[in-house]
Amino acid sequence: MERLTDIFGMDVFNETVMKERLPEEAFMAWKRAMEDGETLDRDVADIIAGAMKDWAIERGATHYTHWFQPMTGITAEKHDSFITPAPCGKVLMEFSGKELIKGEPDASSFPSGGLRATFEARGYTAWDYTSPAFLREDAAGVTLCIPTAFCSYTGEALDMKTPLLRSMEAISKQATRVLHLFGQTEVKKVEVSVGAEQEYFLVDHRSYMKREDLLFTGTTLFGAKPPKGQEMDDHYFGSLKERVAAFMKELNRELWKLGIYAKTQHNEVAPAQHELAPVYSSVNIATDHNQLTMECMKKVAKRHGLECLLHEKPFAGVNGSGKHNNWSLVTDTGKNLLNPGKTPNENIQFLLFLAAVLEAVDTHADLVRLSASTPGNDRRLGGNEAPPAIISVFLGEQLDDVVTQLIETGEAAHLKKAGRLYTGVSTLPSIGRDATDRNRTSPFAFTGNKFEFRSVGSSMSIADANTVLNTIVADTLMKFADRLEKEENFEQGVHNLIKESLAEHERIIFNGNGYAKEWVEEAARRGLPNLRSMVDAIPAYTTDKAIEVFTRQNVLSATELKSRAEIDYEIYAKEINIEARTMISMSATKFIPSVIKYVTSLAKSINEVKAVGGRINTTVQEQLLAKTSNLLAEAQNALNELQRVDEAAVEKKSGRETAVFFHEVVVPAMDALRRPIDELETIVDRELWPVPTYAEMLYEI
């Protein structure tokens, strides 16, 4: 029986493997590059490449790839073999430092938002030596995958990793400046630590293949709510079904082999919904690991006759799927800067970093909201099962009281204690109670020693969300450091700064029910933005405020920001267009023909009954025929209208104009078509209904 400790990381060219296989000088050069940001010499890169190749070939690898993350939200790769021609028709297996450091995939068809002309194809991948290479085995064999960044010929970022790496450097620099002012000069680096909880659905592969909407869009565009949904809470944390358990067992093994700290697994709220949570790691590695996790989920599911659905809202009327992004700051000396300690009211350093996060999120709430935006997430945010679209911060009773005291008096003289929890059962021990309860309706919640950004969608890369968080917090810390470095009395200066910042940005703190209608009204009074859709949020990229903060921190240029806005408009329009065309196809070729068969059969039966003669009552059949025929006519009219507006969308000029048209005109037309089709599903004979229903898909495994 395999032991977890034996298989963990076996497919990763990690630090342990490098130490075993590299000369000490080369290994230490790599360590210095990792820890101090030193540049790796070409000679060292050649040594590492050779060791990496030998290790990979020993494990059966024949090819390598520069594994990168274009602005599609998924990963990309181009495979090259290790072979090099040798005399007498033979080959050598070679891999140089040049090939390790740099690739030229071109990859000209990926979204660039105008950064590259269509006739200019050159694009480069650059080795990210902060994220370890790994092996992946599939039908193509064993491939050495090298995490890389992807940029244009002129150096602009064409991917999601490059801005993330830049933002990591920015926040490390500014956080270290602040810590040095507190006398912690031994700190050389501050890392962002992230744990990304991943929610997903599992459905049977056979049902999946019978639904065009799942095949083409990842979500069900039609479907009546089943008689039973999640209201009994019997699936949540319930015992695992055999097929699901077998899937999770194999998934864990695959992830552990890749060095991914898969920790927690359980059934989620909705039927057929599940969750996986990892242990925290550096944000860059956490981002790579989350992409690998999603890829593994899909591959392993197929081996078990299942399909893994990562869409934020694959089924209307039941819980959607998110990706809770747990974010914290950790020094290279091992200290969590967001750990309040036992007396947070006296922990001035913690309070300063807390104030920085609050100010950053308040100042740039529009960017935070944008970082969690996808067309699919529009159906989830604010849907009484996920955080609202309004960005606010939950601190909890204890910290909220500390903040109030600081704002009102300039000091927090007392602290609300946590105490003990007594169950009232003599055979159960009393347990320590946290200082505050949790708030699952908050999009950005403090949860003890970290912030949990709950709005990120389940299908999304976590790169964008963390790039934004890193950048805006870095900019606020820069502002704080600039001011504090000029203070003659540092202690008094830091107290004044904390009080002023908290007072100015107190409006972002909300500990109540984020689902309540009253909160929407209260948020408006506070002046908090309520960006209800992705299309509403995209302009946040190109505001003067956004351009200033991203350029000041050297994370994204104005040109790169504008390109990302164009890409998002394009993505939104394309995804909604695919959904609209899928609805048109399914309605015209499946649903309406099936309903016509049902109506014809019903009319025929009425006539046959009447032909018998006598006083046989056919009122029920006639009422059913009338209702079905009316819904059929409504569906056909809605189908005609959806076809019309979808065709009209191509006439729009700009990317923004097209996206807005799809959001404001096409999406309502899609909803209008769905309504009668879903109602017809509840009427038409099940044997005539052309696709698996919600009831079948959610409960068949």
Image (cartoon, rainbow, N blue to C red):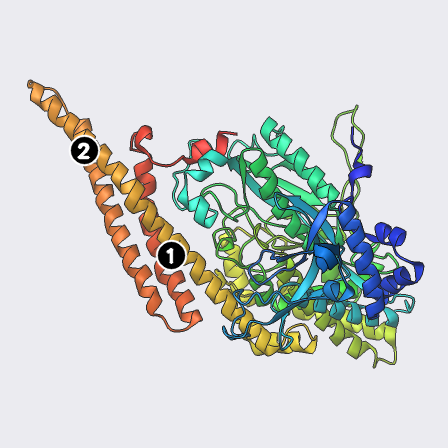
- Give the alpha-carbon distance from disc 2 to disc 1, as whole Å: 32 Å
Tally the numbered discs: 2
Q: Find residue 600 and name its label.
A: 2
Q: Earlier in the sequence, mark 2 or mark 1?
A: 2
Mark 1 lies on a secondary structure that is: helix
Q: Residues within 10 Å of mark 2 (few under 14, many from 20)?
A: some
Q: Amino acid at mark 2?
A: Thr
Q: Nearer the viewer, residue 149 or 698?
A: 149
Mark 2 lies on a secondary structure that is: helix
Q: In the image, 222: left or right of 407?
A: left
Q: Residues within 10 Å of mark 1 (few under 14, many from 20)?
A: some
Q: Nearer the viewer, residue 61 or 122?
A: 61
Q: Find residue 17 and name its label.
A: none
Residue at the far front: name it. 88
The residue under the point 84% across, 60% down is 346
Where residue 477 sits in the image (x, y, percent)?
Answer: 75, 71
Looking at the image, can residue 295 be seen?
yes
Give above or below for 318 relative to 423.
Answer: below
Q: Nearer the viewer, residue 225 or 77?
A: 77
Pointer 1: what residue? Answer: 667
The residue under the point 44% across, 31% down is 696
Q: In the image, 567: left or right of 9?
A: left
The residue under the point 28% across, 51% down is 639
Q: Amino acid at mark 1?
A: Val
Where residue 230 sits in the image (x, y, percent)?
Answer: 51, 35
